[in-house]
């Protein structure tokens, strides 16, 4: 139950636009820094970290794409390694 809820939440977050989220980053950072023992403050902290998570995910994703373009895609290794007869 919990895992499926998190999966649905992640799917919804993946649909959010980073540019739109980034415009809210400052707002939620300020709310987070202004501590209040309220549910609104707790939600602001969660939202701030969701925004950062999307930004971090996109950064890693883009770095990996750039690296693959420079070096070519890695071949997945499955089972036995590719061997060839050098001398018979």
Image: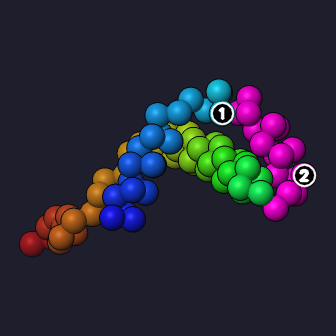
Residue 49 image point, x, y percent: 68, 52
Q: Residue at x 45, y 40 (%)?
A: 12
Give the residues drawn in magenta, as a range. 22-37
Instruction: Give the structural element (helix, strand or loop) at label 2.
Output: loop
Q: Residue at x 83, y 46 (%)?
A: 31
Q: Residue at x 38, y 49 (%)?
A: 8
Q: How many marks?
A: 2
The residue nearer to you, when weighing 83 against 32, is 32
- Of labels 2 and 1, earlier in sequence is 1
Residue 18 image point, x, y percent: 61, 32
Q: Quadrant of residue 79?
A: bottom left
Instruction: Give the structural element (helix, strand or loop) at label 1.
Output: helix
Residue carrying label 1: 21
* Quarter in which the N terminus is drawn: bottom left
**Is residue 60 rendered to the left or right of residue 46?**
left
**Is residue 72 rendered to the left or right of residue 18?**
left
Q: Residue at x 53, y 33 (%)?
A: 16
Whether residue 60 is visible, yes or no, is yes
Which of the labelled discs sits on residue 34, or is there none?
2
Extreme residue in the right direction: 34
Extreme residue in the left direction: 88
Of tags 2 and 1, the one toward the viewer is 2
Q: Please determine whether, in this image, residue 4 is positioned above or below residue 59.
A: below
**Is residue 76 rendered to the left or right of residue 64?**
left
Tell me if residue 87 is in the magenta stretch: no
* Quarter in which the C terminus is drawn: bottom left
**How crowded is the residue under tag 1: few (<14 C-alpha within 10 Å), some, or many (20+)?**
some
Which of the labelled discs sits on residue 38, or is there none?
none
The residue nearer to you, when weighing 2 against 54, is 2
Main SS category, magenta section: helix
């Amino acid at each position: 139950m919990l895992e499926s809820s998190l999966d649905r939440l992640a799917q919804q977050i993946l649909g959010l636009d980073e540019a739109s989220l980034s415009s809210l980053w400052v707002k939620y950072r300020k709310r987070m820094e202004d501590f209040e023992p309220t549910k609104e403050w707790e939600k602001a902290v969660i939202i701030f970290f969701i925004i950062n998570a999307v930004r971090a995910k996109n950064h890693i994703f883009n770095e990996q794409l750039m690296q693959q373009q420079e070096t070519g895609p890695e071949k997945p290794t499955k089972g036995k390694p590719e061997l060839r007869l050098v001398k018979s």
